[in-house]
Image (cartoon, grey):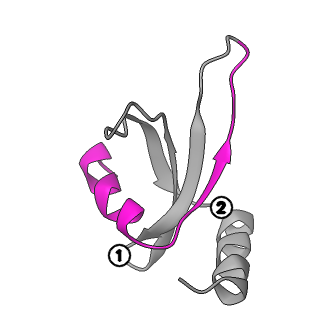
Amino acid sequence: MDFTDAEPVFSGFTLTADMRTAYGGRCLLTLGLLESQVVSVTHTNRGDDIPIISIRRATKHEARFYFSQVTINPA
């Protein structure tokens, strides 16, 4: 997966958790869909920009959690 692939993830239903680092920086983990596959995107926010740190296929546990939330909270 390429970082440029991450942009469409943010246009759909996402779940984001704040994963602050030990040095006080803000690091966010977002679960969302990319071409019908749940992905995990680690990123920061800088104004309107979303600098990507990493993107990977979600684990089975993350995907199950994502779909359970979509069912509860439809977009």
Residue 15 part of the magenta-drawn span: yes
Name the secondary structure under disc 1: loop
Name the secondary structure under disc 2: loop
Q: Amino acid at mark 1?
A: Glu
- Whole-angstrom CA distance, mark 1 to mark 2, is 16 Å
- Seen in the image, is 19 located left or right of residue 5? right
Q: Nearer the viewer, mark 1 or mark 2?
A: 1
Give coordinates of residue 25: x percent, y percent: 60, 19
Residue of label 2: 59
Give coordinates of residue 71: x percent, y percent: 68, 89
Residue at 50 percent across and 73 percent down: it is 13
Residue 16 part of the magenta-drawn span: yes
Residue of label 1: 35
Q: Are marks 1 and 2 in contact (CB under 8 Å)?
A: no
Give coordinates of residue 47: x percent, y percent: 36, 34
Magenta span of residues: 1-22
Q: Which residue is more in the foreground, 39 or 25?
A: 25
Q: Which residue is more in the foreground, 60 or 72?
A: 72
